[in-house]
Each structure stands twice: as structure tokens, then as C-alpha cells.
Amino acid sequence: MRSSSLRIVPVLSALALATMVVPYAHAGCGMYRPSSFDGSSQHQFGAPRMLLAGFNDDDDDRRAEPTIVGTWKEHWISEGSEGIPDGVEIDAGYAQWHSDGTEINVSGLRTPMTGDVCLGQWVKTGAKTYRLNHFGISYDPTGQNLVGPARIQQWLTLDEKGMATSGTFSIDQYDESGNLLAHIQGKVIGTRVTMDTGFEKVE
């Protein structure tokens, strides 16, 4: 997979694909807290309840229902992108989906100085389907000159056990005047990160 990634470095540099930052590293983002957080009900008796990652906790129905909320290891594979062969890995990294509808993503194949983080919003579109819309800020290969925003979208399906996702993505890179510089699309696959997850190479 490494050789394929190296072949598209010039393409990625030209696009300055924006991907993915932990909210604490952004001034103004502050500590993450779900919008539905109720301090009086959750913390009045001391330690908060611990929820099993990837499952909803419903006081009226204790049956576990898989959810996309949690941390994911993702691989983005080109499919139908002009100038990039099908099967080439566009990116790989980690994403977190939060219960308040926000999302963060950290790229593993882009250097930080060109823009390797993005933030977004997600909605549930069906029983186990989701749509994500997020943005990153891209710089040229020197990390000194701003290219513009990249709009990155995903359409995902969660598996029955809530441990894997699959779907499609699109990346639209713009300059600061709103001109579309490039469009990339393909498929994305994800596996849930749990307390039992061990070493796994980025690519």
C-alpha cells in the first residue's frame, strides 16, 4: 500500500486535501460535552455512569442498540476519481463521532503543515445509515501558503454488530475564491477502536 500512496503524493499536494484535529487543540473549541448533557442527573451522585462504547443506553429499554458514536480507524480508497487509479489509498487515519452530532478526523497520510485535520457534523439518515459533512483547511506543500477549504463528505452504513462501517466519500478542494480545484471520490471502510484494540499500522 505504501508504494501506491507515494505515487499520489504530487496529486495530494496539489489538492492540499484537508483532513482532521482533536477539539482540545483548537482555541475556542473547549472541552467536549454532549448537548444533551445534564450535570444534575449525571453527576449528582459522584462518578458518572460508564456506557459501553458504540451502544445507546436507554433508561426505558436496556437492549443495546449499535450507534456510530465512538472512535474509528478508517481507510479511504479511490474509486472513479479522475487521474487517480481505482484501489489507490487516498488516506488513512482516525475519526471520532460524538453523540451531539459533531465529528473530528485526523489524517495519517498527510503532513500536519499541509492541513491534516478537519471537523464536521453528522446526521443519522436511516436505521444504520449516516451522512457526514466536514471541512478542513489546506495549505500548499510548504505549509506557508493557504490553498482554501476542502469539503469532505461520507455516506456510511454501520454493520449489525456496530463494529464496522462501509460506504463512500467525496472530497472537493476549493481555493479561497470558491473555485473547485479538484474532486476525489471512492469508498471508505472503518473498524471501531475499543479498549482491546492493539497495534495496527496507519496505512
Image (cartoon, rainbow, N blue to C red):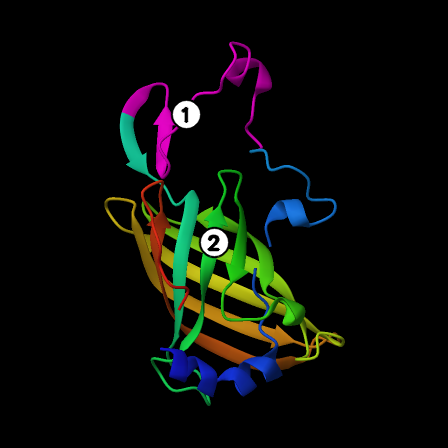
Residue position marked by numbered label 2 in the rendering = 95
Q: Which residues are magenta?
A: 35-62
- Which disc, if any, is residue 50? 1
Element carrying mark 1: loop
Quarter placement of the N terminus: bottom left
Quadrant into which the C terminus falls:
bottom left
Q: Nearer the viewer, residue 180 or 5?
A: 5
Q: Main secondary structure of the magenta part?
A: loop
Return the residue found at the far left: 160
Q: Is residue 138 magenta?
A: no
Give the quarter of the image for residue 176: bottom right
Name the residue nearer the viewer: 137 or 144.
144
Q: Residue at x 49, y 17 (%)?
A: 47
Tell which circle, 2 or 1, labels the residue nearer the N-terminal end.
Answer: 1
Q: Amino acid at mark 1?
A: Met
Q: Please give the name of the residue rendered at 48% of the width and 20% of the height, measured from the top-left corner.
A: 48
Locate residue 83, reporting x and y percent: 46, 90
Res 149 seen here = no
